[in-house]
Image (cartoon, rainbow, N blue to C red):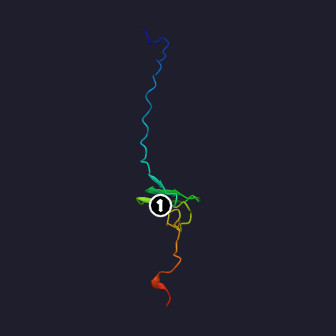
């Protein structure tokens, strides 16, 4: 009979389909502003250079990329240029 063997060997097993991939975590949306911070949909955990972990549970988190922030790694808008007018307003001139 075809497919049988008298030596007791089992027929070769056909490879099964690949097992299903494990469920993936939802993707995080990241927005990069060349003039400002990186915005990431939270919650976010950031591993700092010294190994400590900073966590934010906010809906959207602004990550500092210029390192000027006093609240690093969170952005405090220190990257924005500070502009002052050349002349004082008219109502503030000394009398």
Q: Residue at x 45, y 31 (%)?
A: 18
Identity of the residue furthest to the top in this view: 1
Q: Is residue 37 above or below residue 14?
A: below
Residue tagged 1: 62
Report the quarter where the N terminus lies: top left
Residue 41 drawn at (x, y percent)? 43, 55
* 17 with respect to 72 (left or right): left
Q: Residue at x 50, y 60 (%)?
A: 37
Q: Is residue 90 above or below residue 41?
A: below
Regarding mark 1 in the picture, which secondary structure is present there? strand
* 87 with respect to 19 (left or right): right
Residue 8 drawn at (x, y percent)? 48, 15
Identity of the residue furthest to the bottom in this view: 95
Q: Residue at x 56, y 59 (%)?
A: 48
Residue 79 drawn at (x, y percent)? 53, 65
Q: Nearer the viewer, residue 10 or 47?
A: 47
Q: Is residue 3 above or below residue 21?
A: above
Q: Residue at x 46, y 83 (%)?
A: 90
Identity of the residue furthest to the left in this view: 59
């Amino acid at each position: 009979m075809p497919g049988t063997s008298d030596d007791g060997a089992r027929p070769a097993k056909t490879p099964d389909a690949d097992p299903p991939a494990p469920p993936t975590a939802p993707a995080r949306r990241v927005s990069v502003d060349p003039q400002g911070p990186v915005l990431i949909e939270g919650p976010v955990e950031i591993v700092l250079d010294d190994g400590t972990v900073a966590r934010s549970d906010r809906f959207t988190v602004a990550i500092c990329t210029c390192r000027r922030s006093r609240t690093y790694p969170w952005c405090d808008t220190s990257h924005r240029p500070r502009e002052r007018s050349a002349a004082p307003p008219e109502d503030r001139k000394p009398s």
